[in-house]
Amino acid sequence: MAPQPTSKPLRLLVALGVLIVGLAVWAFWPGTDSSVRLGLDLQGGTQVILKPTPVTEGASITEEQLSQTVSIIRQRVDGLGVAEADVTTQGSGDGAVIVVSVPGVNQDRVVDLVQRTALLDFRPVWGIYAPQAATPAEESPSADPSASPEASASPDASASSEASASPDASPEATPASSAEAAPLVQATDNSADFQLQVAELDCTNPLNYTGGRPDDPEKWLGTCDQTGTAKYNLQPAFIQGTNVTNANAVLPQNGVGWVVSLEFDGDGASALASASTELTALPDCSIGANPCNAFAIVLDGVVTSAPRFNEPILGGSAQIEGNFTAQEARDLANVLKYGALPVTLEPVDITTVSPTVGNDQLRAGIIAGLLGLLLVAIYLIIYYRALGLVAVLSLAIAAVVLYLTIIVLSKVIGLTLTLAGVAGAIVAIGITADSFIVYFERIRDELREGRTLRQACDSGWVRARRTLLAADFVSLLAALVLYFLSVGSVRGFAFVLGLTTLIDVLVAFWFTHPLVVILGRSSWMQRGSKWTGLDSGRLGVVSLSGAPSKGSRRNASNTEVSA
């Protein structure tokens, strides 16, 4: 009598069913986008041509700067979840341009993300003033008690950007100046001339608080906040963006507003502790003190937020709060995380790119893939009969899981599918089919060694899964190497190949093996019909029920029948 099987196939099938239902609910949840994001070659996108110019006037663009700029832009765009962006340079030196092609992303968002220099610094606040430009009769600015930041900084470095001027000092109070925009004013010291220039700065002009440009962190700075509601006179920076080691968009525990969390290196943490200790001892900005205990977080020459120090910050971390949306917080974190551009970028051309592969070619490729899948299915059914049907069902389950996973990843990380990704999925069909074949052949070997079908389904799996895992590990390793050492569409191919390889392992363990075990326990399979794919005549063994088969009676006397 055969030993009782130890595997519990129904549990695995139920677990797979729960997983598929969960993915389906996630993928097709009402009110969310349930479509697969297509790449530039399938759906078109945005192409931006950028002209790099040196940060320092009179300098020349070097090849190293161009290479660094391309690397930073690619990381920023990948941070959007777009793994199929194409970033290239055309020309060299001062005549070079950078071409960025991104599938399916809003034009304005792409331009804003790639052209930002992202020079970040932290500066002590000398004075905060109303945003309007001073008239010639007015004196140089002095601290305005009514224009103080309504924020504070605590040991966790919560930095709020709710700085405000007096109620009557709003951007609407004075028409925007028609003069040429001057987003920032700089000087080596806080001289009377510098204070006069700060007074003449008009922060009600949107160009002055949205058109920021890189500032010199070693000089005094006169600039606006990012909403145009206040004007700042700032001392030289005590921390620069190069001291930021990590930046992430997070939702606070109170769930109110997204923030950007910053982490500093050793020098940055030390400078933050020293500056916060010194500024904490100064008077509150609300009493009109010059200087005061506030510090400004300046990004590309514009004040993002200006909190006050209530006590020293010794933890080496900070948070930027600015009433961000989730997207704005993630974009800012990506810009800060991947560093400042070594050059200034000006968009010279923005175009909408049509798909490089027409609908007819795409349809032909899909038809070719389906025909190939059909031929594989026909071969499996002819050769393995009932087991072939199990293989076909496994391929179908793998396809469903892959489709649902791609939709979910499109929502979560912005996965973009291109023809290269489709090729990776098609290549994986062969890998998945090989897994089934290895298992089925192991079952046949076990039957030839005299085991019953119920025993062969379990013992054959034990032997087959080693081969299956080894083969899939090699495929996954190749996909990882391709993904991390390549760019553009090759990364898309590698990602989908690795994803389908993992799904192959899942389906083999949670569907193919359990279903074969269940079939192996059925009386129909144990009778060894020729439609099972395991009939004794083809295997050259006694019948699975223990009696000699028609095709093996001549050799029955030479065959040892197991008890």
Image (tube, rainbow, N blue to C red):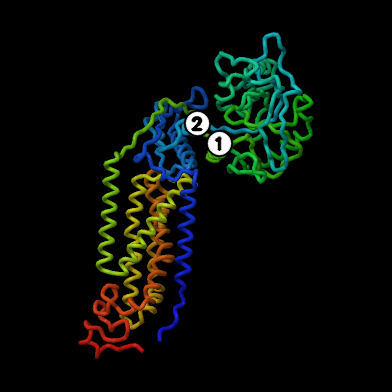
Q: Quadrant of the N terminus?
A: bottom left
Tell me where residue 384 appears, x and y as whole percent.
28, 69
Q: What amino acid is at disc 1?
A: Glu
Q: Is residue 319 above or below residue 449?
A: above
Q: Is residue 329 above or below residue 13?
A: above
Label 2 sits on a secondary structure element that is helix
Residue at x 42%, y 25% (from the top left corner): 348
In this rendering, which labeled residue sits more in front, label 2 or label 1? 1
Could you say which quadrant of the image residue 282 lies in? top right
Check disc 1 and report the residue beneath it.
328
Q: Hey, which residue is sitting farthest left in the picture?
A: 554
How packed mark 2 is, by other alpha carbons closer than 10 Å (few <14, some 14-19, many 20 or more), is few
Q: Is residue 469 in view from this perspective? A: no
Query: Distance of mark 2 from mark 1, alpha carbons?
Result: 11 Å
Q: What amino acid is at disc 2?
A: Asp
Residue at x 46%, y 77% (from the top left corner): 6
